[in-house]
Image: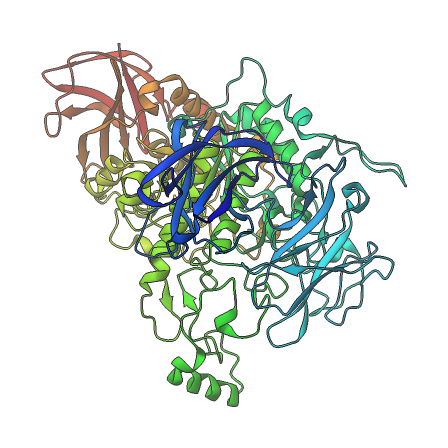
Amino acid sequence: MAMQTVELQFITGLKRKIFRNARLCGSWDGNGRYSEIWSESIMQEDIGTDGCPIFRATVALDLAEKDKTFKWGVLLDGPQGANFWGVPTEVQDANSTARYRQFQLAGNASPQTERYYFTYGRRLGANKYFATGGALPGLRFAVWAPNAQEVDVVFGNPANGYIADDGKGIDPRQPVVALSRAPDGIWEGGPQENFESFKSHLYMYRIKNAQGETVYRTDIFSRSQIGRGGIDPARDNWPGTLDTLDGTVSCSVVIDPDVVRQDFASTPPGKQPALIPAEQFWASEFTFGLPLSTRLDDLVIYELHIGSLGFGKDTPGDLGDAISFLDHLVDLGVNAVELLPMAEFSGNMSWGYGDTHHFCIEASAGGRDKYRHFVRECHRRGIAVIQDVVYNHYDPNSGRAEWAYDSNAPEQNIYYWYEGLPNDYPAFEAAAKLAEQNHSTAPDRPIAGHGGYLDNGSTGYTPRFREEVVRQQFISSAAFLIEEMHVDGLRVDLTQAIHRDNVLHADGRSIGDANSFGQKLLREWSRTLRMIHPNVMLIAEDHTGWDAVTKLPAKGGLGFEARWAAEFYHNLIGDSPSAEGKARLLKQAGYGGNEPLAMDSFADALNASSHNQVVYHESHDEAGNASGTERTIETAVNDVLNEATRPWAEARSRVSFGLSMLSAGTPMFFMGEEIGAKNQFTYNNFMNQREDILGERRNSGKTLFRYYQDLITLSRRQRSIRSHNIDILHRSNANRVIAFKRWSGDEEVIVVASLNNAPFANGYVIGKDQLAIPDGAWKEVFNSDAAVYGGQNMGNGGTTISSSNGCINTKIPANGFVVLARQ
């Protein structure tokens, strides 16, 4: 019988040897015929043309079965253990979570090759290419442009790093590299010369698009963009310098991902900075005896916007400022830092929630090597790094990145989900035509051809999640952060925009397939990352209450470990319009009266903090950017902060942080809270609102900083506070008091907190109404009203008090709390 030889390859795309003992599994029998009972055979390990481990095996299949669709996958041993399924990617079916690859026989005698790319980081972009028998790697370009008629690589002038739409800026000294199209729409090719000779070269893709127009596009899988400024030369006057050029429209850069700049000391003119192998760089990553927390339960997270550092400079903060800031975080006691997005974004003054190049670290902040230095310095200090990432939309100004990459037709806008064709929306198109005739400039005006795009509650249209390349853009860039940048965790922005809220722009109809493929993305993403690093910490900003968000994919979930708890914030603080109907404790207390507070409603949110939540009393969103919000210390006195009200403001702020810190969730707070930062933090004015955190720590913020230090220290010392165990013992709306117990094993603490404006100086009885308090001796181990924190020293004086008959009588300070530990 005639046989077809098929080689099947599992390509990791990761430099490190993570997996071993690969076994090919496929739907064929020992005679090469299709079978529902899958066979298993050993795969051979090798180094692929990308320089990364690859596993391959060859099978002979009966050509009589050429009409059958064969399925295959790989079993692996690795960080997750032995015998786990090595294909995290699901089939291209919105209603299926099955994970396998498939193919049909070509039907000829030529050998056939089927490949599965675990990650795309070294499949697409400008990468090393190791030819068989080659001593040195060459350079290979690969770009996904399925609608293009032609694709070339052109090199840019290193003096300015920009190629205009008319081709001005192409370096005539460099050759044009023509790429060839593969059946999957990926164009590839490149010079076979020494890769080293092309390092630091600037390039763009010159694409003849579906309409026959020549357009210039950046490399979506670029690892570095040359521009470091905020000017798009197509829109504004540009002086022609790299420092002023917007990175998102600038040339991409050929870089070697396997080396790191040794230091950032000034380099003499004409000299290149010293580079060392990445393995050598990371060899000194940790400090002996100073552990790095890898459990979300053990973290105290400091949310940091790097651009808001650098107080006193006339430019945004950068990674150098962030490294200098780390000793402050060590003194504070936090053991994790969460960075606002650092992927390449438009301009150089931004929060970063609108990215274009997910494998790039924003050049104006210092770029990829400075980022690696930052992560290493964090780890040397025992601080974990969590990175915010954005997958629900692209930068709306991504005209040289994702938008219309290889076609002007909306339905062929390959990185954006478009439903149907423009003429499917006649009413929308008519409205768009009318708006154009009336010269409307309203931001929500209908635009011709846009009816089929999807909105999702973010600030841009939905990405085309149904395309595997688009999903891999996000998955592989996350793998890059975990594997190459050594990031410890990721927080995904507004996940409900990915898995639930996709609606048609024309009329608001929900698009179920987009939601399903969004869920597929998140499952594939979490599976892939845990295969690489089982202890990676994955957090969702999700406000749906859907319990599947924090379940593993194997149990029907999306794979996150925890989600941001906005409900907790709205009940505790409540300065946002979204808090309508919530407890809003601090907002109500800030009016200064002593009316009842909804402690019962807050108790529900507090109790819910035990369910995989990151809780916070302040985040970047609610520190003045969202309507009605402001800094905690301002909300605490209804925006009337002065010398007379500051003691009240600080006392209530201490309670706010205390209830978050002592909850059953993972606590987080935004930068500056520890010194009583008061300026509003807004996306468009943060430069003018920066505060001198290090200076205020020694001045007006001194006592609040000491309070944060001591409470964080208490939480790290008491395992009961780091557990998920919580019981609400007492809540009184009229008295504005709440009490709860935290425990782990035989260690127990009771927290009694009050937002009453008067102290309970003669004691307050807790117990009986909710849960009985165990009889015994309880020592006051913390008092938020201590004089060292700027308080009045109202409390139990650190003494031991007894509980009996299920009750305890404790003094409680005004706008304060005490922590009692069972002896």
Q: Position of residue 797 (x, y in %)?
A: 33, 15
Please state which of residues 335 and 652 is positioned toward the viewer in this rendering.
335
x then y, percent, for residue 144: 58, 58
Classify residue 281 by image quadrant. Answer: top right
Q: Residue furthest right?
A: 270
Q: Position of residue 200 (x, y in %)?
A: 77, 46
Q: How is the image coloured?
A: rainbow
Q: Is residue 343 left or right of residue 229?
A: left
Query: Is 308 situated above or below 229?
Result: above
Of residues 552 and 153, the one drawn nearer to the viewer in this rendering:
153
Q: Position of residue 748 (x, y in %)?
A: 26, 17
> Can residue 678 be seen at all in this image of the molecule?
no
- Residue 433 lies left or right of residue 198; in this view the side is left
Q: Nearer the viewer, residue 115 or 760?
A: 115
Q: Can you name the residue that lies furthest to the front here?
A: 1
Residue under the point 24% across and 13% down: 746
Q: Is residue 669 visible?
A: yes
Count of numbered tags: 0
- In terms of image quadrants, where is residue 326? top right
| Pick the front one: 652 or 362 | 362
Tell me the quadrant of the picture where the C terminus can be found: top left
